[in-house]
Image (cartoon, rainbow, N blue to C red):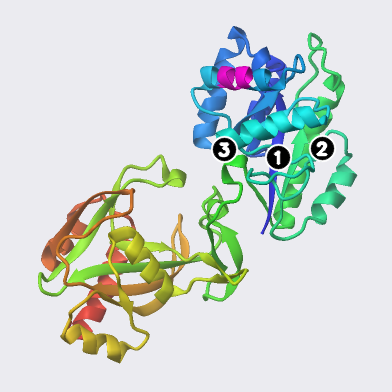
Amino acid sequence: MKQLIINADDFGYSKIFNKSILDLIKKDLISSTTVMVNYISKEQKEQVQKLIFLKNNHELSIGLHLDFINSNYEEEIKKQFEQFFKIFNFKPSHLDVHKPNNSNEEFLAVLNFCKENKLPCRNLGFNYEDIKTTTQTYINGTDNSFEDLNSIIKNFKNKETYEILFHPGTYDKDCKSSLNKKREEDIEKIKLINPILKEEKIELVSYNNLEESEYIIHCSENGEIISPISKFYAHKKGNRSNLTHYSTWSMVYNPALKKYGLQLKTPKNYDKNQKPMWDMWVAGHNCYVKENGNFRPLLFEENLIKETDEEIGLDIKMFESKENFLENAKKLTRTIGYIFEEFLYKDNRNNEWVGAGLILTTENELNFKDKEVIEFKWLEIEELKSYIKNDLDFYSALPLMFEKVEKFRKENNI
């Protein structure tokens, strides 16, 4: 997957420029902006609040656009960083420099501050050891024509991360910016390059997602693996219901108790407008894992081992053979699992190729490691049926999964 950050420099430089940047963010045409804190005024308070609101409702990084007034770089960075926090009440996502002079002293000051504060910064083509940045040097969108940008974007390489910076805005007669007249051209360029990203399958990301560790398995609707895709991109508005990806679902059953387990989970970041919901106990997207320098997809049995450990702290033994699983179920001495079915689950929100599993355990109390879990409970079969029939506080896939697991359990006398 090719990734691109589109950053709007100069938020704060002018209320007129701010308005254009906010509009582009609302339309999801840019994924990042950097703020010139020395220019933020009381008159911009409402725009600052809008920017914070957009950050909470869009995938957006808000960084600090350093504007060096003198050559005391360390002091200037510290001062502007503190001012940023005072304005926004959170740290900047990353640092970049307004009109960098590319001096060694300036670069080292920014580099050291980023290392000390674990902040990403813009890639100017230097050595960025121990600092998060794009894999490729930044591209100045303002200085390139649309035709040049079109050619550059179409030559992006797979597994590389890029940044194109722009200076969007409409003409502000009261601003002394040397780019004043070019800003409207930047808006048009941004609008024109966005359709190209879709054509070229380039993921628009922010500095928040830089070096995202989890890539999930993008597949066809019959389960054929296509490529890795970042979890953020898969859950982005408009993608979640259109891009099929692998997921492992399972329910935990304690034969001695004759009860199933349920967990109450907080919404994930990309579901933050939802309330906590009850869900099956062990479930998760299948990711790619690094092995001998290469990445390979984690298939259903492996993924259930991983998710069982991460969510409920149990060491599970998986069986590929149904016969071996059922034989061990008769004399259950440890937690065991089996993937009994694969199917496509698709609704107006989800599009997943599912490996459905049953986990059998002798444990009564579980060590929940997953921070999303608020509460858990064991329910007898009839209790769970009644719960699903009369309560709406559960994820939509739960009734289907319960039906499938119950059918498998009954057919095999577990």
Please name the residue that numbered disc 2 is placed on: 141
Question: Bounds of the magenta span?
Answer: 78-84
Residue name at image x 58 percent, y 34 percent = 116
Q: Secondary structure at mark 2?
A: loop
In the figure, residue 315 lies in which quadrant? Answer: bottom left
The kind of residue on which mark 3 rests is Lys
Earlier along the polypeptide chain: callout 3 or callout 2?
Answer: 3
Q: Mark 3 = which residue? A: 118
Which secondary structure type mostly characterizes the magenta part of the structure? helix
Please name the residue shown 56% across and 61% down the image: 243
Crowding at label 1, few (<14), some or many (≥20) Cα neighbours within 10 Å?
A: many
Left/right of residue 260 with respect to residue 189 in the rendered view: left
Q: Which amino acid type corresponds to the residue marked 1 in the rendered image?
A: Ile
Q: Where is residue 6 drawn, in percent x and y?
A: 70, 40
Q: Secondary structure at mark 3?
A: loop
Q: Are marks 1 and 3 in contact (CB under 8 Å)?
A: no
